[in-house]
Amino acid sequence: MRYLKQFSIILFFSLSGEVLRQVLPFLIPASVYGMILLLIGLENHWIEEEQVQDAAEFLLQVMPITFIPAAAGLLEARDQLEQMGAVMVILIFVTTVIVMAAAGIVSQRAERGRRK
């Protein structure tokens, strides 16, 4: 019963994100809206971490399984990827560095905010 309640809370925020995507004119995925709403709910203590923790941990454990279809799709596009090999490697490297830097900056700012 605990998992059902926790998944229901996460589903509520996910569906709220879907509604926002339909209402707002921005090209932002509904899942991003849902995660932002969940973050706002957690930060403002409208919901407590314990109310979604077990379901969130389960979803994190099974998340790698969701990448298998995407990897299979890459195998089907192998010829096109081989033609763009060097460009792809450079793009992957650059975007990885950017994401790592952004994650580091956000983490540092969040930690500073918690200390205050």
Image (spheres, rainbow, N blue to C red):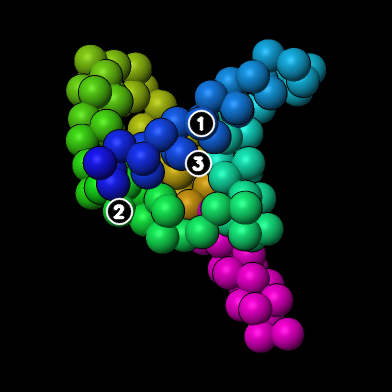
* Mark positioned earlier in the residue sequence (2 or 3): 2
> Could you tell me which residue is drawn at 20 percent across and 35 percent down?
65
Q: Find numbered disc 1 in the image and state the secondary structure of the residue it sits on.
A: helix
Task: Inspect the image, locate mark 1, and give the three-letter code of the amino acid beneath it.
Answer: Phe
Of residues 14 and 105, which is closer to you in this image?
14
Q: Please give the label number shown on residue 91.
A: 3
Would you name the residue on which mark 1 appears? 12
Relative placement, left or right, of 89 versus 106 is left
Of residues 18 and 111, which is closer to you in this image?
18
Task: Inspect the image, locate mark 2, and give the three-letter code of the amino acid beneath it.
Answer: Asp
Q: CA distance from mark 1 to mark 3?
A: 36 Å
Question: Looking at the rendering, which quadrant does residue 74 occupy?
Answer: top left
> Could you tell me which residue is drawn at 54 percent across and 34 percent down?
13
Q: CA distance from mark 2 to mark 3?
A: 36 Å
Residue density around tag 3, few if under 14, some if 14–19, many if 20 or more, within 10 Å: few
Residue density around tag 1, few if under 14, some if 14–19, many if 20 or more, within 10 Å: some
Of residues 38 and 68, which is closer to you in this image?
38
Magenta segment's dominant SS is: helix
* Mark positioned earlier in the residue sequence (1 or 3): 1
Give the magenta range.
98-116
